[in-house]
Amino acid sequence: MSRRKPKAVFMAFGTKGDVYPLAAIAAAFASDQKQYNVILITHSAHESLSSHLGEKHVEFCAVSSPPVLSADQNNDIEGEAKSSFLLQKKKITRDHRRECFSLIERIFGDEPSLDGDLIVINFFALEGWSLAECFSIRCIVAAPYVVPYSAPATFERQFQREFPLLYRYLIEAPAGKVCWKDVDHWMWPLFTENWGSWRNDDLHLSPCPFTDPVTGIPTWYDRPQSPLVMYGFSKEVVECPAYWPSRVRVCGFWFLPIEWQFSCTKCRETLLYDSSGHQYEKDNLCPRHLELQNFVKDTPIFIGLSAIGSMGFLKDPHSFIGVLQAVLSTTNYKFILFTGGYEPLESVVRTIATEATLDQNSWSEDCLSLYNGRLFCFFSSIPYGWLFPNCAAVIHHGGSGTIAAALQAGTPQVVCPFVLDQFYWAERMHWLGVSPEPLGRNHLLPDKNDNRSIQEAAHVLSLAIHVALSSRVKTRAAEIAEKIFLEDGVSDAIKYLKEELSLN
């Protein structure tokens, strides 16, 4: 009987910024290691990845859970509404874990595991750690950002009190073995009830990792290696402190293949291929998007909030557009707004255009201009690597992918963080000198759609843009871009995976 191929499963959950970088690594790994069967497990909402991955011989496997489960982000739901949301979240989590188990069982359950098998997870796919343990598969962590959650201040003290032997097991771990640094850095959620009951009831593992399922005492006889943790950012941008686990590897930013970043097939073909079908890059878009191409010749300011709308933060698109209009009325800036596929925002833009009695016959399906052609609204996607070098500044939410693209382009930034690692990136960009102080969310998305709120937000935003366009910030952004120019984060990630697996 022929020996089966080793399998590499990449399990990534969350928004596009959480998932797509791991998909890029999966595609690169499949191209480099053709003896592997490579699979990506993610949300069905990212189905658009499947064709790109298929070209690289990566299987796309979907789970039905949404990338984001949003209640009211201002935490003002209560009573029955809050109870209903919590019940919904519990059911989605239960179904999500069941689907993940079924997929991993289908992939690995038929035959004994091979030494070369692996599961690569991001920080929103922690179920992958326990599933890897259940099927005796090596587990590796890969994330395009620093850990987006921190252990409670009392975690270590409480852990030491509840699990004294396990705490000693981790503190006294020999070099290279899993230790307290791993737990403190990223593993700590695995020791909470949220995961413990699932591990015990459904996977028939011990509730706590590294303990015997029968006795509950640490597995002194079996000390696993400290897991490899790969980060998709640059050492020039993020400091790597000595207290991080010894098995952390910083790769450089994980940029997506440029052909993945087009929503318009004709633009992709026009930008990347000549008439003979040979790949190259130039500056022209397809005829349908010449208006976008011409607009960026004026070096506009980019504004994009990516998944912030779907997360529930952009409750009143009217006030957001009102802030941009107010800034335009007191400056000579031009804005290019990417709507991120958020339908309520796109609907408001179209309504404003209709009320302005614009010639609707001149509208493109995915772009239109407002306010005398000074706000260009784009409803699709184009590579940031093409767009950002043509922009004066980038106003955004602090997602790791947008951060990376702006740094690579050497374009000043204005960051308005909303959740998780976005606050870290916003502060880090200010510390590096490539952006002013982070905006508060009400300075981009006012809570009230009244003139005072909008004017106050517009004033703060205008001041931030003024700082971003200063010679000091421009110079610093160019310096950082030069430092990271030669980095190839995806290639470094493949190198570390091959070292881990002892592959050529």
Image (cartoon, rainbow, N blue to C red):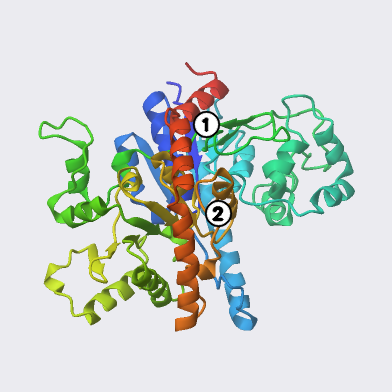
Front residue of 499 and 185: 185
Q: Quadrant of residue 318?
A: bottom left
Look at 42% across and 39% down and name the residue there: 408
Q: Which residue position holds label 2?
A: 422
Residue 74 locus on image (x, y percent): 58, 73
Precedes in sequence: disc 1 or disc 2:
1
Above or below for 490 versus 98: above
Q: Is residue 489 visible?
A: no
Residue type marked 1: Cys
Left or right of 76 on screen, residue 182: right
Mark 1–mark 2 distance (CA, rounded to whole Å)? 20 Å
Residue 199 locus on image (x, y percent): 68, 49
Q: Which residue extends farthest top?
A: 504
Look at 41% across and 23% down and name the residue there: 35
Above or below for 90 versus 139: below
Residue 357 locus on image (x, y percent): 18, 80
Above or below for 345 versus 473: below
Disc 1, SS: loop
Q: Which residue position holds label 1?
A: 251
Disc 2, SS: helix
Q: Is residue 168 visible?
A: yes
**Quarter occupied by the N terminus:** top left
Above or below for 423 versus 445: above
Residue type marked 2: Gln
Q: Quadrant of residue 361?
A: bottom left
Look at 49% across and 60% down and name the residue there: 464
Q: What number is the disc on residue 120?
A: none
